[in-house]
Amino acid sequence: MEQNVERVARFLQEAGTYYLATAEGDQPRVRPFGTAHVFEGKLYIQTGKVKAVSRQILANPKVELCAFMNGEWIRVAGELAEDDRLEAKQSMLDAYPSLQKMYAADDGNTQVFYFKGGEATISSFTRPAETFRF
């Protein structure tokens, strides 16, 4: 399982940008994200508590994300859980130093979520899709 979470994180990191889908009532919402970090064996993403995406995830933690790179794409579906520990936030900020211009682990706004479990599918037009859990 840990190997699978590392594989998902590596794909997302190498792609650079992925698109995270949430729901706001019955309306889907999609936006670009760039944070994908493994901490304590779990896949984490980061946002700010002041953003609509934060409220959407807290109201409905089921999300899906998608990234495309070199003719392959990954889709990751799962449920997110907030981790309010300073060490989880700091680990994310250490992994993405550019975020430190806007966020600090103890600023009251930085927010990290981890996938409680998920399913990833890597697809391309040239070979069969591969699906795995993490």
Image (spheres, helix red, strand yellow):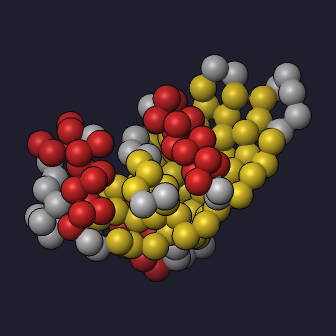
* Residue found at the far right of this picture: 128
Q: Percent x, y for residue 110? A: 22, 62
Residue 115 position (above or below residue 125): below
Q: Nearer the viewer, residue 36 or 58?
A: 36
- Residue 110 seen: no
Q: Residue at x 66, y 40 (%)?
A: 74
Q: Nearer the viewer, residue 95 or 121?
A: 95
Quarter of the image where the C terminus is located = bottom right
**Apparent side of residue 47 relative to residue 45 in the rendered image (left or right):** left
- Residue 32 seen: yes
Residue 10 position (above or below residue 63): above
Q: Residue at x 65, y 56 (%)?
A: 1
Q: Nearer the viewer, residue 100 or 28?
A: 100
Q: Nearer the viewer, residue 41 or 54?
A: 41
Q: Percent x, y for residue 133? A: 71, 58
Q: Residue at x 40, y 56 (%)?
A: 39
Q: Percent x, y for residue 83? A: 35, 71
**Apparent side of residue 34 relative to residue 27 in the rendered image (left or right):** left
Residue 132 position (above or below residue 57): above
* Quadrant of residue 105 within the rendered picture: bottom left
* Residue found at the far bottom of this picture: 59
**Apparent side of residue 51 relative to residue 56 in the rendered image (left or right):** left
